Image (cartoon, rainbow, N blue to C red):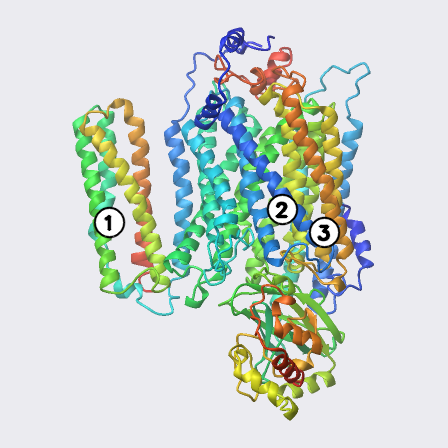
Amino acid sequence: MATHAPIADAVQEAAPRRYWLEVLHDWVTTVDHKKIGLMYIGYALIFMLIGGFQALLMRIQLAVPNNTFVSPQVYNRLFTMHGTTMVFFVGMPILFGFGNYLVPLMIGARDMAFPRLNAFSFWVSAFAGILLYFSYLGGSGLYGAGTAPDVSWFAYAPLTARVFSPGHSTDYWTLAVFLSGIGSIGTAVNIVATAVCMRCPGMKLTRMPLLVWLYTVMSGLVFVAVSPLTAAQIMLLLDRYLGSHFFDTQAGGSAILWIHFFWIFGHPEVYVLVLPAFAFANEIIPVFSRKAIFGYPAMVAASVGIGFISLSVWAHHMFTVGMTSGANTFFTLSTMAVSVPTGIKIFNWLATMWGGKIHFTTSMKFAVGFLFQFLIAGLTGIMLAVSPFDWQVHNTYFVIAHFHYVLVGSILFMIFSAFYYWYPKMTGRMLSEKLGTVHFWLFLIGFHVTFDTMHFPGLLGMPRHIYTYQVDRGWGTLNMIVSSGAIFQAIAILVFVYNMVNSYFRGRMAGPDPWDAWTLEWAVPSPPPHYNFAVTPVVESRRPLWDLKHPDDPDSQYE
Amino acid sequence: MPVASAASLLATWDSTQTSMFSPQATPAHLILGLSRLMLAVTGGIFIVVAGLLTYVCVRYRHRKSGPNAIQEPQQIYGSTQIELSWTVIPILIVVMLFLATARIIFATQDAPKPANALDVTVIGHQFWWEYRYPKLGIITANELHIPVSDPKHPTPTYLTITSADTDHSFWVPRLAGKVDAIPNRINSMWIDPQQAGLYLGQCNQYCGTQHALMLLRVYADTPEQFTAWVKHEQQPAVADPSAAEGRQIFQHNACISCHSVGGSAATGRFGPDLTHFASRSTLASGSVPLTSANVRAFVNNPGYFKPGVLMPPMHLNPHDLDAVTAYLMTLK
Amino acid sequence: MSEAAFINSNADVPWVMPSRGIVGMCCLIIAEASIFIIFIAAYVYYLGKSLTGPKPHEVLELPIFTSICLLSSSATVHFAVSALEHGKRSLATLWLAATVLLGGIFLAGTAHEWYQLIYEHGLTIRTNLFGTTFYSLVGLHASHVIVGLVMLTVALIFSLTGGLTTRHINRLEVLSLYWHFVDAVWVVVFLVVYVLGRNA
């Protein structure tokens, strides 16, 4: 098993060193899915540092009651920017980045279906992020000072109307998110077309890796979820600039309409974010348990089921707006229903590990952390589905704790797991396991100190979106504990960034298949040549490399 | 975080003013009862599944030494029976929890309204609360007085809730769940505090810069206290001759374009009604204790206590400021 | 590991995958349909809720002629694709020209209708809820018609200069799929705005 195709090696050595301008030009004009994927990931990591910094500032402000670390205006901008950045400019790009990189490789294709659309989608999204942050300079209010948006990440009308949000800060929010939506829809089109139309011979849909299935379902959700937000933002812009009355309550318009449209987007959006995390788990957990995924057909069915049911639950964000008891009951039922296929996935992962030989690499440690934390996140989600309980804790720190358990404890943990797993394929070098262990334990401790504790102020009445709170509420100690956990997480992230940079230059050489894995991306060199596969592979089962390594016991005889 | 032990931890916080775990009205009681069932169910699920996960991680850990170290374990692709059971059991749990929840939804939202219920209209403003008692002819602000309700002969208060500008949310955890105050929409809820006293809460839907200090104070009065309060509120403002100068300055400045003082020329509705301002224990929607010094500081610069509040600084000279403060303090 | 080592036992069965262009366009259609559904939802929600100003039945006239033109253009573009599939390039050019003409008539009709609404009835996007939802929904559809017409005109120009050959059948099919979508949306908009919502 050679580590590189010999011809490619020779060409590489004979090519002269390129000017940095040539390298830059190459990256800026590339349509190669691997380079675009890496740009998405790099871009998202930068915004993650910014969003994380915003979170640190907020936690310092809330550590003690009646704090004056930042003014209310600055605080309100911080939570708006933190939420918007993390969802649209960290979560979406990093997951699209991994999808871009892996989907063609895992189906034996040379590139995505529409490479130029791919590049366009990236650059539109990148511009959108810069546009959002330009608001700090350009979003002039009545007093001429630059202001970032301060309407919260869900920008409820009529707070976003011209009269309540003068100046341009809201417009920067609207346009930036709108453009990022265009980029998301473009990438989603690409992923579906690639998975449906570009699989290598022999790879029937029933043999497609679960990662590709989940990215396809996620992309389908993007079509029907991001579009409602796009529509609502067009309506908001028409209201603000052409004097229309979509959300103008003075003209008989409805504030509730924005809330419905936003959550028709917002709820499927969180499934858009979590399905790729499931995708990573479906690939990583079997490899480090040394067993095939338990119940592949059920996993596919559950994923598709989650996709469909998630379209019917949105008003569980609206249990307090005054819907009828019938409507509240329906959304309670649909929200509880989505827990069934989700629970099935957790059980299937457990069953995959059962009877296996679990290797606790850093990647697997993060995956196990994901399993544990996603279980808790799902359970607090079921609690929130109980609408009377939600009438008490809606819009409190209980909800913030729940969704950070999903976004950080589940999705980010799985992203870290994916980094440690696929970094060798992308760069040809292994990440340091020692530093990875430090990263894991520091982050785990910090995460739990912050987000376990955070449930309690919510149960004790602390709302979200407040820049300070009264001494007599009894929330001071709890907030101090929550804030202290943030420091551990920040240090862990720095360790992780150092690991990635250092290993790029000094990491152990990885070879094509460092984990003894089974899907097609491990059949090409690390990093892959720009054409991916010299000869288009032909597959006979779900785990083509398992078949090659175990000719006496191939998967194909079990399907 | 094991949710079963969370409930016992919370018991020590029972005395906090805004804990849903120390309910004092029927809606809050109903919610807590359901929540206990919900915590038990989710706690049970957690213990089972997390226990299995821990077991799996320990039992099936790869051991580098040993006879079968490099051999792959047996590949198992699925099991219809097992998968069916872990589909059916969660469905049954969901159905049970759903039915228990539906019962409470209907009991709270669709409770019939008794004839002797008190009607109060709650209007959320940026960043204060307006309360109107339509049948009693009272308009007041920021401190809500309602009668205590004897469980044997309930006298609940029915709140009709809306907003004059952006979205707000009315939430007093010890009494009931929250209901949003949305412009151009009428929402309703009912509360029946079973013990006299002060109940705290705050606006629960981000409504702008000073959302954080839009606090709620609900006084559950004994029948005698409530009757006295109503009678007092129905009077026009006290016309104390010693405060005449302050009243003059008040009426000749922009104050009257936003504020009302019953029985005077001030009839503005944009800001809180000040007819019985000095009888309240707080100003600035519950966030500042009402003392002469605080009133003076607030009138001089409202942004000192609430940066970003909509009341502008009035730029009165110190003499006028003292006079207006004295006038306001007579509005008992 | 040499990638050529995979076992190839089904070489006799051809491996056929769907067309990327068609799948991609279907995905785009789903996304665009979702946007339209939201505007239609807003339209229906606000029926009868305008506080002042003109009402639908006071100012709307059924756009029968322009609708027939637009829906016929779906047929003509289908014939254009058929003609190209059979290698009849001049016929394809003719049908494409007919499509562009019919689409242009629809657009001109919409412009005329709007002119009358604005200047004779005083209905603009800011007049009332009806104006807001009408102009945004019909306008969103019209913008999709414009984009479609631009693409069809480009195809027509290529066809006129002899650049549209049987090698481009798939691309023309993808474009015609978009055009069918635009027409289907019009059917819904027509029903909701001019028929069902007329008497609100």
Q: Amino acid at mark 2?
A: Gln
Labelled disc at residue C67: 1
Residue at point 52%, 45% (across, down):
A133
In this rendering, the answer to whether C12 lies above or below B314 is above
Which residue is identified by label 2? A54
The image shows residue A412 at horizontal and vertical percentages of 64, 37
Q: Chain of mark 3?
A: A
Labelled disc at residue A455: 3
The image shows residue B248 at horizontal and vertical percentages of 56, 87
Q: Is residue C184 left or right of residue A44?
A: left
**Is there CB contact under 8 Å for labels 2 and 3?**
no
Are marks 1 and 2 in one subunit? no
Labelled disc at residue A337: none
* Front in this rendered view, residue B138 or A23: A23
In terms of image quadrants, where is residue C95? top left
Q: Amino acid at mark 1?
A: Ser
The image shows residue A338 at horizontal and vertical percentages of 60, 45
Q: Amino acid at mark 3?
A: His
Q: Residues within 10 Å of mark 3 (few under 14, many from 20)?
A: many
Q: Residues within 10 Å of mark 2 (few under 14, many from 20)?
A: many
Q: Chain of mark 2?
A: A
The image shows residue C99 at horizontal and vertical percentages of 21, 39
Quarter of the N terminus of chain C within the rendering: top right
Element assignment for label 2: helix
Q: Residues within 10 Å of mark 1 (few under 14, many from 20)?
A: many
